[in-house]
Amino acid sequence: MQNMQNILKKIVPVVLVILFSSCFNEKKLAYFQKAPNQTDTIVVSKAYEAKIQPGDILSLYVNSLSPEASSFFNPYSANTVPSDAGGSSNGLSQSAAPGFLVSNKGEISLPLIGNVNVGGLTTAETHDLLLSKLKEYLKEPTIIVRFLNYKISILGEVIKPGVYVVPNERITIPEAITMAGDLTAYGKRSEIQVIREIDGKKEFGQIDLSDRSVFTSPYYYLHANDIVYVKATKSKVVQSDLTIRLLPIAISLVTVILLIIK
């Protein structure tokens, strides 16, 4: 009887490990392993510059040799200077910040200056346009232009799915995955879907994070309002099904073994 108890005590942990552990192929979890050759240099896809669209919210901070006069153009940011530093943050709190809403016509309304058409321009182009207009009212003006609602959505098999605001207005797919805490072990690295809206139409692109060609993909740089969806591997479906079916059996087996040991 004592020998039987010792054997059962050794078997129980093994049975539980077999039932509930998942075995993953290391190659399926690795990034950037596939390559046409062994060269260490890859030409990266051209960097994306966001264009201002209707519905965007812009932060404008104006300064000059006369702070009092400058403050007249800063109704939403009198005490706040936008940061030039890049970074990312989870949530939508920044998009709720006050700013200049771009109208359906692509215009923003500024004190004294009036309506200015910025639709289709980059923030750099908008900076130059507004600076030229500010010179009519201020001495040696400067201006900082930023998006307040530049965001992406990350769904599926990631650690922290959600909507992420991107203050520096430029983000790559690896950076987005990092923001979301990386893929789960069940995330299908070879089939990352990027959903992008272009001229009112939805475009569905695919990225293979296990292949180095991702750096040359048009989806390497994410656009504002892109949706990144990480599919689950078949092993998750199988594992979930096995767990549901085997859990009652495992519990019963452990109960019987414990009764025998006692």
Image (cartoon, rainbow, N blue to C red):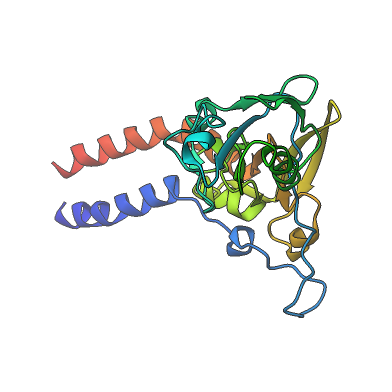
In the image, residue 76 lies at what x, y percent? 51, 28
Outermost bottom residue = 39
Q: Which residue does the image show at 64% across and 46% down from the upper left?
A: 169
Is residue 63 shown above or below 55?
Answer: below
Q: In the rendering, at what x and y percent does residue 49 appear?
A: 75, 48
Q: Residue furthest top?
A: 104
Camera-side residue of 175 and 83: 83
Choose between 232 and 74: the one closer to the eye.
74
Q: Quadrant of residue 259?
A: top left
Residue 180 visible in the shown view: yes
Q: On screen, 14 above or below 89?
A: below
Q: Nearer the viewer, residue 31 or 180?
A: 180
Residue in the picture at 53% in, 29% down: 72
User: Who's the residue at 55% across and 45% down the image?
Assistant: 64
Q: Position of residue 126 (x, y in %)?
A: 73, 41
On screen, residue 178 versus residue 8, left or right, reads right
**Residue 245 makes an appearance in the image:** no
Dividing the picture into quadrants, the one containing residue 52 is top right
Question: Where is 182 relative to 258, above or below?
Answer: below
The quadrant of the picture occupied by the C terminus is top left
Q: Residue at x 43, y 45 (%)?
A: 20
